[in-house]
Amino acid sequence: MIQVKDLRKMFGSKVAVDGVTFNVKRGEVLGFLGPNGAGKSTTMRMVTGYFNPTAGSVLVGGVDMLEKPELAKSCLGYLPENAPLYSDMSVVGFLGFTAELRGLYGAAKMKAVDRALDTCFLDSVRNQSVDTLSKGYRHRTCFAQSIIHDPEVLILDEPTDGLDPNQKHEVRNLIKRMGETKAIVFSTHILEEVEAVCSRAIIIDHGKIVADGTPADLKRRAPGADAIHVVIRGFAGSGIRAELEKIIGVEKIEPKSCDDSSFSGRVLSTHKIKPSELALEIAALVSAKSWKLEELHREEGRLDEVFRSITRSDVV
Ligand SMILES: Nc1ncnc2c1ncn2[C@@H]1O[C@H](COP(=O)(O)OP(=O)(O)OP(=O)(O)O)[C@@H](O)[C@H]1O
Ligand SMILES: [Mg+2]
């Protein structure tokens, strides 16, 4: 549904997007992650035809955005980062107006507006003027305009930004549900959102894709992925640590606390030994020494660790 190839955008001499390539299929929700200024919004603006790329191509539903922008845009909904709203209109008036822009009139328009009001939980403010809405409701009104024509492709730039926790949850569920039948790209700075909603995630940094995979794939790239977390009692922590270091395949011990009678921390392996084997070795050591094993589990990598390890924070 979305085919992006070697996309590039320069602002003067500044390279904002530097050769981005990705595809999104129907049924896929792609998360866009990256530090501030990485190029996420600029990429989305090119995918939606809002900006012309300096180089590269965008196909939406197989239609070239540069050659046939109107046709390509007809199957696409876009929630921009700082969406402008016609502030003197009521919510229902604004949505009716956006429906007309999409070629919907009469009963089809009414149906589209009611569906969008319902989907975005806007019914209670339907007749309120847009300029008196709270930030979250304004944001939801923008979301509603992006889905007014029930598009097959959705590009959502930080769709949960500014929403309260309940609404964040609702919007995530909505994206997930819509993602079953549509192709969705959304950007976020909330890493749990990626795990909760995305089938795939891309991390973009300095205009380039630096990681692309399922959330589980990405987590495996975390520096602490597959470490074994232990809490052992019954001996001096320093002595326990020294014995753990002797296990073949152990690369490093990261203590969390170490005192006269206990050790807690994580054991990192060289990856020549499987985490399950390392866990068994640790359990055998504890048993041979008659120590007490209080906790032992394999740590999943964390997305924030992956993010920090592969992105730089010096973007301006
Ligand atoms: N219209 C513009 N003119 C000049 N530079 C721009 C313009 N739009 C974006 N940029 C620059 O392009 C780079 C990428 O910006 P972009 O808005 O795509 O980042 P982002 O990843 O969406 O960041 P954020 O997480 O803060 O939303 C930044 O350095 C930004 O200053
Ligand atoms: Mg942005």
Image (cartoon, helix red, strand yellow):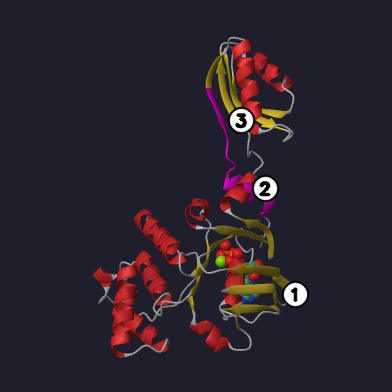
The answer to whether mark 3 is within 8 Å of ligand 1 is: no
Q: Is residue 78 above or below residue 194?
A: below
2 vs 1, front mark: 2
The residue tagged 1 is 13
Residue 234 - label: none
Quadrant including the N terminus:
bottom right
Amino acid, disc 2 = Ser
Q: Which residues are magenta?
A: 295-313
Q: Secondary structure at mark 2?
A: helix
Does the numbered disc 1 mark a residue whose Cβ is under 8 Å from ligand 1? no
Residue 299 lies, with reference to residue 238, above or below; the image says below
Determine which quarter of the picture holds residue 135: bottom left
Image position of 244 (left or right of 86): right
Q: Please report the residue visible at 33 percent of the width from the left and 76 percent of the height from the top.
A: 130
**What number is the disc on residue 309?**
2
The crowding category of the residue bearing disc 3, from other C-alpha atoms within 10 Å (few below 14, some 14 to 19, many at least 20), is many
Query: Where is 161 relative to 233, above or below?
Result: below
Three-letter amino acid code of the residue under disc 3: Ile
Q: Residues within 10 Å of mark 2 (few under 14, many from 20)?
A: few
* Label located before the other in sequence (2 or 3): 3
Where residue 2 sits in the image (x, y, percent)?
58, 73
Q: Are marks 3 and 1 in contact (CB under 8 Å)?
A: no
**Mark 2 touches mark 3? (CB < 8 Å):** no
Q: Earlier in the sequence, mark 3 or mark 1?
A: 1
Q: Which mark is residue 228?
A: 3
Q: State which quarter of the image contains the C terminus.
A: bottom right
Position of residue 89 in the picture relative to residue 224 (left or right): left
